[in-house]
Each structure stands twice: as structure tokens, then as C-alpha cells.
Image (tube, rainbow, N blue to C red):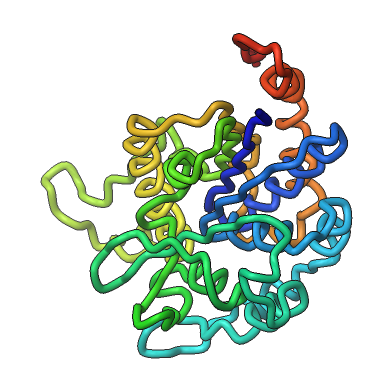
Amino acid sequence: MAKKIGLVLGSGSARGLAHIGVLKALHKENIYPDLVVGTSIGALIGSIYATGMDPEEMSQKFCQLTRRWTIASFFPRFHISGFIGGGMLERFLHTFLEDLSFNDLKFPFLAIATDIETGKEVIICEGSIKKAVRASMSLPVVFIPVHYNGKILVDGGLVNPLPISIAKERGADIIIACNVTPKAKKNAKSINLMDKNGKFPPEFFLRARKGLPNMKKVFFQSLSIMENEILTANLQKAKPTILIEPEVGFFNSTAFHKANEIIDCGEEAMKNYIPSIKQMLNKNFTGYELPKL
């Protein structure tokens, strides 16, 4: 009996473009996932792939994104529920997903989102693909939440940034998971704004402006810390067969204009595991040894 391959694509903003590289490496070796589960940017890449688009074509399209597009897409437009309305994002999604539903996909795909009112994980596998992806990518405060089947949904990374457990529940025999959530910086220097007496000096505000990160950095670093904690806990409950972690931590969270470089990182990381996957797909396979990286 053929082994069922489940591909799990995690959250990570622009770093998630590395997922395309993972798909390119698999396709070059004629290895095709039977199931894809994605969170946030992973849901975007996974859904486009599930429509039948070849990874090479996906790569070409994403490499056309410019810095101007990024600025326009993330330009704040104040709303009571978020800084960004998402209109630009929805138009972008439409170029790939149009008005397709889950019934139009070539193979099973699942998007993960979070019910902002209950805090529970929501698995989306029916209805509008575009709306499902929009919900899975709705970073709290940044993007306006999405109404979906009576629920108010936000980014799935809040509860399951790398949904390995879902692929396992859906019967995947071999689970390939790609994690692009950046690790929190180690040995970061703390900034002490107080003097030796524990009081704020007169130049406090000047030092604060020079020494503290801006709001964007604080937000994305906080998100990274949270998702890493959740991921560590989730990996104790459900482990993938292979965990791919492309070296993309040095890319900015909105570096979509560097798609070519990020995609290459994903492809290079995946290449190291191709021999092991081929061994696992062999009918006579009894055990495998992952490469030492």
C-alpha cells in the first residue's frame, strides 16, 4: 500500500516563501504530497499549490513582487479591529485563487485559523478558499479579522503555527513539516534606562528613542517568541517524520520583494532530505537515517 505524504507548511510571514522552494525540490524528484496543511503564509502557499499550480510557476509569480507592493499592502488604514483592512491582500489572493472552493482543489488541503472569541483552533476545509486563506493570515491587530461560518477568525499561528497534529489526524504516513518561524534572538543585550539609583535620568526620552526597537519590531518579535513557545509544546505531542528549517531568520517579516532568495533557501534545505524521503517511499523500506546537517 502506497504511503500517504502529508506536507505541513507553517507561519512566518515573508519567510514562508521558503515553502515554495520546498515544493520545487520535491517536484524535481517527482515526489508529490497527498495532503497539505497550512497556517498563515503556509495556508497561502499550500492553497495555491492545491489548485494545481506548478511550484516553478509559483516561484516566478512571487518573484515579481516589489518593495512598492509590500509597502502598499501593509500601509496602515485605521479600523477599529486592525490597522490594515486587507483589501490589497484580498486582490492579491484573487489573482491566484479567484472564486474557487475547496471542492475545486486537486487534492486535500486544510487551512488553520483561530477563533478569536474562544481561542480555539479552527480547521477550514470547506467553502471559499480565498476567504479561508484570508482568515488564516489575519494577524491580530494588523489585519481586520474575518467572519467565517459564524466565527470571527484570525491568524492560525496563535494556536498552531506548524499544524503537524492535523496531518497526523488525517492519516499521513510520512509527514514533512517546514518551519520558518524565526527563533528569538539569543544573548540580546538588555537596555537599562534607569541610573544607578533606580531613577530615570533627564535624557530618558532621548535614550528611549535611540535604544528601544520600533513598534513593528516589538510586535513581530513578540509574535515570534509566542509561536516558538507554542511550537515547542506542540512538538512534544506530535512530531513530524522530517522537520525542515530553512535558514531564513535573517529576512525581514515583510521582505516579500526578496522572494527569490527566500525560495532558494527553502529549496536548498529540502534537498538534504530527498534521499531519506525516497528511502521511506520504497516498498521494502524498514528504517531510515536522517542526514546530519
Quarter placement of the N terminus: top right
Q: Residue furthest front?
A: 1
Q: Residue furthest left?
A: 197
Location of residue 97 with respect to 58 vertically, above or below: below
Measuring from the top left, give residue 169's x and y in whole percent. Answer: 43, 43
Q: Is residue 202 visible?
A: yes
Quarter placement of the C terminus: top right
Location of residue 213 with respect to 266 vertically, above or below: below
- Of residue 65 and residue 211, the one placed in the foreground of this image is 65
- Residue, x 58% and y 48% (percent of image)? 9
- Residue, x 61% and y 32% (percent of image)? 244
Q: Position of 219 compared to 286: left or right?
A: left
Q: Is residue 213 visible?
A: no
- Residue, x 40% and y 50% (percent of image)? 160
- Of residue 16 and residue 250, the one placed in the foreground of this image is 16
Measuring from the top left, give residue 123's x and y in whole percent. Answer: 43, 61
Q: Position of 67 compared to 237: left or right?
A: right
Location of residue 166 with respect to 246 vertically, above or below: below
Measuring from the top left, give residue 218's x and y in whole percent. Answer: 41, 58
Q: Position of 203 compared to 95: left or right?
A: left
- Residue, x 75% and y 44% (percent of image)? 23
Q: Choose top left, top right, bottom left or bottom right for residue 248.
A: top right
Q: Choose top left, top right, bottom left or bottom right for residue 237.
A: top left
Measuring from the top left, give residue 172's x and y in whole percent. Answer: 55, 38
Total residue callouts: 0
